[in-house]
Amino acid sequence: MNLYISNIDIMRKKLLSHALKHSQIVEMRMKNKLNTFYSLFLVLLVLNAAQASATPEDLIKDIFVKVGKENLLLNNKTKEEVELHVDFNEMTKVILGQEVSKRSAGELKWFEATIKEIITRSVYPSAPKFLENVKITYKKTRQNTDDAKVFSSVSKKGESTDVDYLLKKIGTDWKVVDVSIDDESWVKTINEKVQKTIKEKGWNGLKDLLNKRLNELKSNKKS
């Protein structure tokens, strides 16, 4: 009888020990999962903080690093990353000027998409080769609460050109809205050409001209 009780007691102790070990294993796994979660959350916070604290100059440098590596038309992921830093909607409003109020939402959407594709198809293919022999010097940045201007000079084959970038703050992000070359606004130049075409040929004439240009670029033809 005593032996039977002794065996039961041993078995009970073994079961308690096994249950304790199982509980410790479960607890350790939960801690590991929580540690992993906290680590990932911390990384996410750091990444978000880094993006939010990126200066306008840092953003311009990042764009040039990406467009200088390859033709971004062949890499959609990097292309999308670069284009997140450019506000094509704001560019559209400035380019069209008063014409914005005369156009439907569909027409404005078409114009923005078309002008964006014309710009990117004009720039991306030739950028890597062009940037091989270029030295970019960043001079200063004039930064306000909602806008900033990054001043730089671009040197190629002994010739230097002033290139400045105008950015606006959209939410917490800086976005490029214009580029000036030797004090000539790129967006303003496009605006003048667009307004001239609308005046001479109307909205349909502008559509024909832009569609023709886009088709040339898609076919790799030179204008």
Image (cartoon, rainbow, N blue to C red):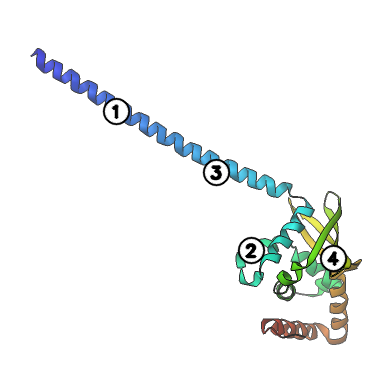
Mark 2–mark 1 CB contact (< 8 Å): no
Total marks in image: 4
| SS for callout 4 | strand
Mark 2–mark 4 CB contact (< 8 Å): no
> Dot 4: within a 10 Å radius of its alpha carbon, few (fewer than 14), some, or many (20 or more) residues?
some
* Disc 1 target residue: 19
For residue 117, what is the image quadrant?
A: bottom right
* Disc 2 target residue: 78
Alpha carbon separation for disc pair 2 and 3:
23 Å
Q: Nearer the viewer, mark 2 or mark 4?
A: 4
| SS for callout 2 | helix
Q: Nearer the viewer, mark 2 or mark 1?
A: 2
Which of the two labelled residues, at mark 2 and mark 4, occupies the earlier sequence position?
A: 2
Q: What type is the residue that disc 3 sits on?
A: Leu
Alpha carbon separation for disc pair 1 and 4:
73 Å
Quadrant holding the C terminus:
bottom right
Residue at 87% from the left image edge and 73% from the top image edge? 189
Judging depth in this view, the residue of 120 and 198 nearest the camera is: 120
Q: Nearer the viewer, mark 3 or mark 4?
A: 4
Q: What type is the residue that disc 1 sits on?
A: Ala
Vertical relation: 38 (above or below) 14? below
Which of the two labelled residues, at mark 2 and mark 3, occupies the earlier sequence position?
A: 3
Report x, y in % for residue 71. Answer: 66, 71
| SS for callout 1 | helix
* Disc 3 target residue: 40
Mark 1–mark 4 CB contact (< 8 Å): no
Quadrant holding the N terminus:
top left
Which of the two labelled residues, at mark 1 and mark 4, occupies the earlier sequence position?
A: 1
